[in-house]
Amino acid sequence: MASEEPVFADVSIGQSVYDEDGDQLGTVRGVDDDGFYVSSPSGSEPLTLTDARDVFGTAYVMWRCWECGEMGEIGNELPSNCPNCDAPREDLYYWAED
């Protein structure tokens, strides 16, 4: 009988992660109860807001602060910093909210 226990990846911040074809996805920038977050490899194209909406589909795309967890609506771009804790834009990421 298969276990009902969740399986967690053994990753650490700064570690490179790869897809099943061996292509680098990026570097782990954070880990929480939902999984781990990856920074894109240098030289890769940034994800535009339109691309993010395509990736997340019907979910409502918002921004979320890595430092404090604050979330907000995205206008045409991410805010220049977190309005709650003043973290820089680099600490904000796209978040899909149902």
Image (tube, grey):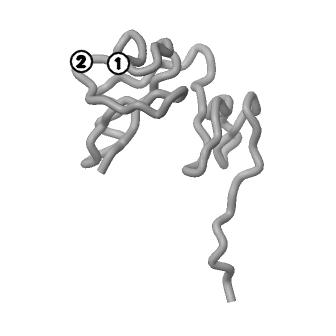
Say whether residue 51 is left or right of residue 22: left
* Amino acid type, residue under disc 2 in the picture: Asn
Q: Nearer the viewer, residue 1 or 20?
A: 1
Instruction: Report the residue at 47% width, 34% height from top.
Output: 69
> Any mark on residue 56, and which?
none
Q: Secondary structure at mark 2?
A: loop
Quarter location, residue 61? top left
Give residue 4's position: percent from left, percent from top. Answer: 63, 78
Residue lying at the far bottom in this picture: please name it. 1
Image position of 89 with respect to 40: above or below: above
Residue occupied by mark 2 = 76
Say whether residue 44 is left or right of residue 56: right
Q: Secondary structure at mark 1?
A: loop
* Amino acid type, residue under disc 1 in the picture: Leu
Image position of 77 with respect to 16: above or below: above
Quarter location, residue 32? top right
Instruction: Report the residue at 58% width, 14% height from top.
Output: 43
Give residue 98's position: percent from left, percent from top. Answer: 29, 51
Task: Determine the CA span between mark 2 and mark 1.
Answer: 7 Å
Q: Nearer the viewer, residue 71 or 45?
A: 71
> Any mark on residue 78, and which?
1
Give residue 85's position: percent from left, percent from top. Answer: 46, 19
Instruction: Report the residue at 66% width, 45% height from top.
Output: 21
Q: Could you classify mark 2 by the number of other residues whose Cα lies within 10 Å: few (under 14), some (14-19), or many (20 or more)?
A: few
Image position of 90 with respect to 22: above or below: above
